[in-house]
Image (cartoon, rainbow, N blue to C red):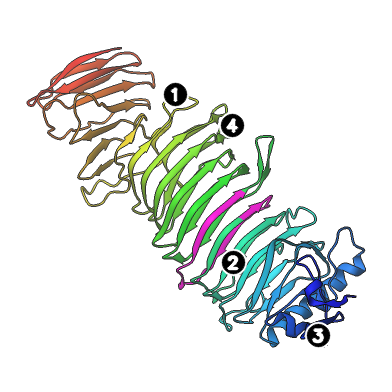
Amino acid sequence: MTDRPLTQLTHADTLSAEDRLYLVQDGQSRQVSLEQVRGGYVTPQDFGVVAGEDMPSERRRSNLANFQDCIERGFDEGKSIVIPPGRYEIEGGFLDLGQRSGIRLIGSGRSSIHQFSDDTPILHVGPPHGSSNDKSVLLVRVDGVNLRYANPQEGKSRSRALELTNVWNSMFRNMDINNAFDGIHKDETPGNWLFSVEFANIRVRNFSRNGIRMMTYEAGSTGSVFTNIYLTNGGSAGRRQCEGHIAGTDLAEGAFNQLNLEWAECDYALRFATCRNLAFNSVHVEGNRFWMDDGAMLRFEYSCGAVINGLTIYRNTIGEGRRFGIIGVDYGGEVVVNGGWAAIGRKEDGASLALVKGMSRPINGYNNVYLRNFKGAEAAGDEHRIEMIEDVELPTEGPGQATSVIREFNSAKASGDDLTRVADRDFDYFADRAGNVVLFDADLSEDRAITLQARAAPPYQEVASPVLPAGCRVRIVRSAGGAGLAVRNHDGEEIAALAQDGWRDLMFDGADWIAVGGAS
């Protein structure tokens, strides 16, 4: 118990309602209450919560009850809940901010709540879990509070460190989350929205399913912003398995600024479906081992639209025998990437990596992917090579019906399995289902080449070329074995033939194609 003048107190003193405090003024001493000193906040210690490590179960359960009492009474009195530095162990349930609009839970950045119960949240915000179309909660602020499970939560689907239900216009900042099944989880019950919520400066580690999972299944979850988010499941010494870093459905008009998605053994880094107008500014994907077959690092499906400004793919591994992609689309995926760089760390035996990959075969709907100033790895060899397109079936109706449009991709070979035709003002792609792909660039100069590559067994179908400016060059590549590959001009005359695997360059001189070099 403290029994001394206020002038002798320091910032290290922890006060409770039992302390006797004195104010000395003009030589006179009078006792004052803690509330008179503090003003607008309470602490868990005021209600009997004890900070410390390795507490007995009874004390953890008591801490839970007393902490919840602090939340409820502090809110009822219109005060913020301020959590001093320390480790606060709880057990037997979770802390519930409930539908208390305007509540403030403020920590120091070194204030950590440790959950010793499995398969339960740590902190819940909003109406009860599973409720639908209930009252929303507004203007909640949680800042500087860390959430941690005492044990990893593999298979414990209710272990959502921060569980949100119908939360609007709120703020969650400066948090470290560890050992959860889902780090931040939006309740999946229909009728619950996530509207104009800010998440900033948050690190999530060692998650079993998703670092962030926002499955809303409800139109209206709009306007949320995620800034400086770091998700990791290990390091170079080892990775922890999970489903993926971030997953979301039915989000709209949201922004993700500076995402780091690192060091996990996972299916994907990002997976979004039925989302619209999502903006990503600086996405960094590093050190992961992707092991889902026919998957992709960044997946956009079911009429999902996104713009990525600055995409870095670095030191990732593609699992043995996996057919994988960097960007995956299906059922109307719309993706724009402005600027980026991909350096693949490793492809295990039998693995392949495509820049753009269809998520089903045949791919469904019209999917559009636009790339600008995106560079692939410069290193030679299959281990670092990124194929252009894989498993993306294009319609034949003509321009305007494009399923995939690629612009300005450097340092990659064009290839494909199921391409048919796509036209764009910058590029035209012509191909057949046997795997021949030809890319024509209207602005191509002599110092840049485009590729026709045969990768599948004959018979090959005819591939027609448009009229291109003089000086345009084309490289044909034969790499599948079998019968030879022949290229004919518009008059049907053979101008290049590859009887064996190899390559040859052609140049359009303004009137016809001529062979200008190469070997077969």
Spatial CA distance of label 1 from label 3 is 80 Å
Q: Residue 273 location in percent, x, y?
A: 47, 59
Spatial CA distance of label 4 from label 2 is 39 Å
Q: Which of marks 4 and 3 is in front?
A: 3
Task: Residue under label 3, please give it.
Answer: 27
Task: Residue under label 2, please give it.
Answer: 172
Q: Is residue 46 depicted above or below 26 in this figure?
A: above
Q: Residue 216 location in percent, x, y?
A: 53, 68
Q: Is residue 133 visible?
A: yes
Task: Residue under label 1, please give it.
Answer: 379
Question: Where the C terminus falls, by quadrant?
Answer: top left
Q: Residue at x 71, y 72 (%)?
A: 82
Where residue 320 is drawn, which disc sits there?
4
If you read the primary sequence from the N terminus, does the residue marked by circle 3 or circle 2 appear first? Answer: 3
The front one of 489 and 94 is 94
Secondary structure, mark 3, is: loop
Amino acid at pointer 4: Glu
Spatial CA distance of label 1 from label 2 is 42 Å
Q: Which stretch did the figure color magenta? A: 203-231
